[in-house]
Amino acid sequence: METAPLDSQDELTALRALVAEQAAKLESQEAEVIKRDSIIGLLRAQLELLRHRQHGASSEKIDRKIEQFELMLEEIEASRAEAELRSGKTTLPELDDVPEKPKRKPLPDGLPAEELVYAAPCNCPTCGGTSFLKAPDRVVQVLEHVPASVKIVRHVEKRMICRECDTTVAGEMPTLPIERGKPGPGLLAHIMIAKFDDHIPLYRLSEMYDRLGIDISRSVMADWVGRVSALLTPLVLLIRAHIAALDRIHSDDTPVDVLDPGRGKTKTGRVWVYVFDGSGYQSATPAAIAYYYSPDRKGAHPADHLASFSGVMHADGYGGYKKLYGNQIVEAACMAHVRRKFHDVIKLKPSPIAEEALSRIGALYDIENRIRGMSANERRTLRQHHARPVLDELKAWIEATLSTLPQKQKLAEAMRYALSRWAALSVYIDDGRVEIDNNIAERAMRPLGIGRKNWLFAGSDRGGERIANILTIIETVKLHGHNPEVYLTDVLTRIQDHPKDRLEDLLPWNWTPSIDRHEAA
């Protein structure tokens, strides 16, 4: 059957319609790509802002927002990659106002490497020839995941008997972290980091080991955790003593739910933190974080923790601290808390006055951003010259404005909050070692906020103390840029045999990894 040819005009019209339809589709797809790229750029900018803004919403709220943005970025970028694959394109059109795609970083050195070789055929598929010249190999490196593994280490102590006097001589076997126990220091370190840094409950960790064919019950690991905590206690005490001997600290506290078997429910305990970090003004004093646990929030606990402390303490407005301030301890209040009071007003309804307060406080933070990392003397001089006039004007403006406001409004409350702490808010102006806010301590509390979502509560008061002790070690180690699992593995290998009068050598700021004796042999 023959098909009659289309009229030339009809054919041309049909082709034009088809081209127009395809052009419309391409335009729509390009618009979608532009929209997605714009969203990615916007989210990246907002994410970066949240990461660096330390004087806005509370730390845990910032964490939640960051997590939400991270998830949105994951979904958008995954969709983008899927679109690339379906379209056969390697990249989507780039826009001048969209951030460039991050450059691929080189693979890290020092990782174990495996080489897979794919031999070329012996016969040319085109002509069947068998004579070849050598050509450069094509090499593609990829990262591959190797499932976690556990191995058995057999410690063999060679022994010999002297033929002449029957004396037994033997090699020197290291003292194991847990006597007559099966876990090596690496396994114990992994369990401690999984529980206290990755916030994985022990029962889940037991299930993960079970998938590897290894039976380690939750109760056995709990026993190991208790023993390791006892081994590390001397180092915890040294870190706490180091903090107490300084003259500048940041403090904060947070609630922790604790099982109360007698009542069949949970009670609220408290974890306190005291931090020293002088990196903002080039201090040579080692940074450290000390956590304490208490069964309640009575002011007697910080008084006990800081019995030997003398100096400036950054803190929030908790009433239990008031008895501490005087000749021995000077209060430095937190400007971030003042800022949040005005921010809370805006969340309820728009307020030009609150916006003005935030703008004035923001000017103080702009100065801090410029002087961060300078010496303490430089910071003091620049604050006195630039920040003091801004701070004085802020106080005068608040006092003048407060008298015009209904006193029961939240805006008036925010202003009274600031004025009631003005002397403590001004301490940082005349001391370059003092910060404008207490965000250093609030950041140190984030592990507790994350941990609560996973382990929900501590099993007992003793469990709360154990959390405080182990976090003291882990967070101080991280503050000095060390891998906490590597640190704990090395320290647990050495601590049993280490001289008690030289335990300072194992503190995170003094620690250097020991050379593996087997590798050195």
Image (cartoon, grey):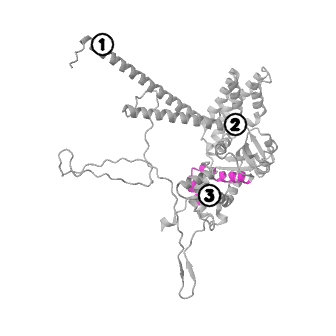
Report helix, strand or loop for mark 2. Answer: helix
Which residue ends up furthest to the front in the rendered image? Answer: 1
Which residue is painted at 62% across and 57% down in the image? 217
Most frequent secondary structure within the magenta stretch = helix
The correct choice, above or below, for 402 with respect to 156 in the image is: above
Q: Which residue is mark 2?
A: 429
Residue highlighted by disc 1 = 13
Contact check, label 3 and label 2, Cβ < 8 Å = no
Q: In the image, is residue 392 part of the stretch drawn in magenta?
A: no
Q: Amino acid at mark 2?
A: Ile
What segment is highlighted magenta in the picture?
A: 462-490
Give the structural element (helix, strand or loop) at label 3. loop
Type of the residue with mark 3: Ser
Q: Residue furthest bottom?
A: 164
Tell me the amino acid under the disc marked 1. Answer: Thr
Label 3 or label 2, whichever comes before in sequence order: 3
The residue to which callout 3 is attached is 217
